[in-house]
Image (cartoon, coloured by chain):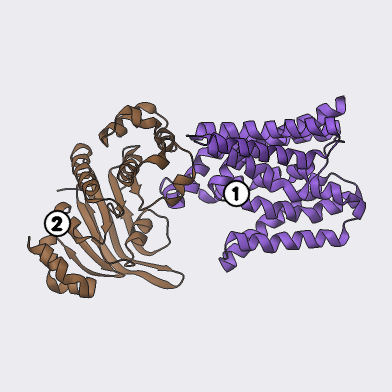
Chain colours: A brown, B purple
Amino acid sequence: MKDTILEVKNLTVELDREKIICNLSFKVKEGDTITILGPNGAGKTVLLKTLLGILPYRGEIKWKEGIKVGYVPQRLPFIKTLPMSVKEFFKLKEEREKEIKKILNSIGFSDDFLNKKIANLSSGQFQRILVGFALLKNPEVLLFDEPMSGIDISGQESIYKLLERLKKEKNLTILLVTHDLSVVFKFSNYVICLNKCPICQGSPKEILTLENLQKLYGQELRFYQHYHQH
Amino acid sequence: MEQILLSLICGVSIGATAGYLGTLMLSKRMSLVAGPLGHLTLPGITLALIFGFDVSLGAFPFVILGIFLIWLFERKTKLPLEALTAIVFATGVSISLLFLPIEKAEEALIGDISKVKFLDTLITFLLCLFVFLLTKSIYKKMVLISISEDLAKSEKIDVKKYNFLYLLCIAIIVALGVKVVGGLLTAALVAIPAASARNLSKNLFWYSFYGILFGILSSLFGIFFYKIFNISAGPTIILANFFIFLVSLVFKK
């Protein structure tokens, strides 16, 4: 039996008196890769932030005692206003240079990458650096917000491969948020469909039926259903 | 001779500290805030000049008031910082112009460090040292917070505490800055060295190093020219800063 890492019960989040998430319950077990799927504005990012303890909520969020969580945010628009090297960015979190180099190598960069200026990185490289940042201090769980937004297809592929590999190497549990259905089939063993209120959850094969997708996405679904058949 | 030494110590320690702190303000897009804060000190400076006590002492409570007002307005209205800047700026200047005796106007607006006393200088130096060390101790955390508050919070950083310490640093340096360059120009003291430094730096280390260096150099130049040509030190320091900025454009990385 695998350990339960996170248990969420009847979670409700309201911001500025607007209900963003209603009555969501789910469990995460060690080694799971869970996708939270939903259209834009469905409350996916809010859910991640709530799980991180950044936003107020009602209901119950129970993490396994002493667990370490890494967070990969969707965008960091202000980071390019600062002259900062990759090494300095990592050092905001972890002092030991040996650890920093280890992580840097594990996300596929060599040591000389440390002195690169963050503002000069491509979006794909920067995304990997963000994954690296989240992996410092050895978290057991990774919360990942829209892993492929703003990255071209080849960059997306390599983020997946990277995550697959890291997952095996470090025995990571991953929760990722996306509006992109293809992610679900490639990558996850459990899906939560969210559009403010939970629509459905379960393994991708059981859950991603035409009817459920219709509920989740409305008119866009033909394309997605087609994708599903492959 | 001794007087010029005191002026130099005052000017250089304020310049260095403001330049260092400024590198954080630029990243947080906060350098504009130093503007209205500086202007809001004018009523305090006016009081100090009328009743004959230290201008920084008069300025400090008004900076605190200014920080509170901007914080309150932003919370209540969600107006952009620039709009609030204009509101606060005009109010501060208007109030002081109502009461400011005209013969004291120059000192209030553009500062005067030509007559600082020994005790003044000592207190200024110690306060600068305090702000410098405090800035150094919160620097990395503030960089992370300015990149992303969410990311900082996910690292269990107490964002409110660090923002408070950061604002405290700003309040002190703005209040000290009015001594050197007056209520009108303090924003430049924090903003310009950082802007020049950013042009030249490829990482944070050089960025903060140049920020400090340019703060020091501009104060040195300003006071040097004041001594030689007998012109006001405050505006000269700012002009020296502008000159360094122009040079930094040429060598921009």
Report helix, strand or loop for mark 2: helix
- Local crowd at mark 2 within 10 Å, few (<14), some, or many (≥20)? some
Q: Amino acid at mark 1?
A: Phe
> What residue occupies the far front of the structure in this picture?
B250
Q: Residue sitting at 12 percent across and 63 percent down?
A: A227
Nearer to me, B170 or A141: B170
Residue B128 visible in image: no
Q: In the image, residue B107 lies at what x, y percent?
A: 85, 46
Which chain letter goes with mark 1?
Answer: B
Where the N terminus of chain B falls, by quadrant? top right
Residue A138 visible in image: yes
Distance of label 2 from label 1 (alpha carbons): 46 Å
Which residue is label 1 attached to? B164
- Which disc number belongs to residue A185? 2
Q: Quadrant of residue A108?
A: top left
> Taking A118 as reference, is B77 left or right?
right
Q: Note whether A153 is above or below A95 in the view shown.
A: below
Which chain letter goes with mark 2?
Answer: A
Q: Amino acid at mark 2?
A: Phe
Report helix, strand or loop for mark 1: helix
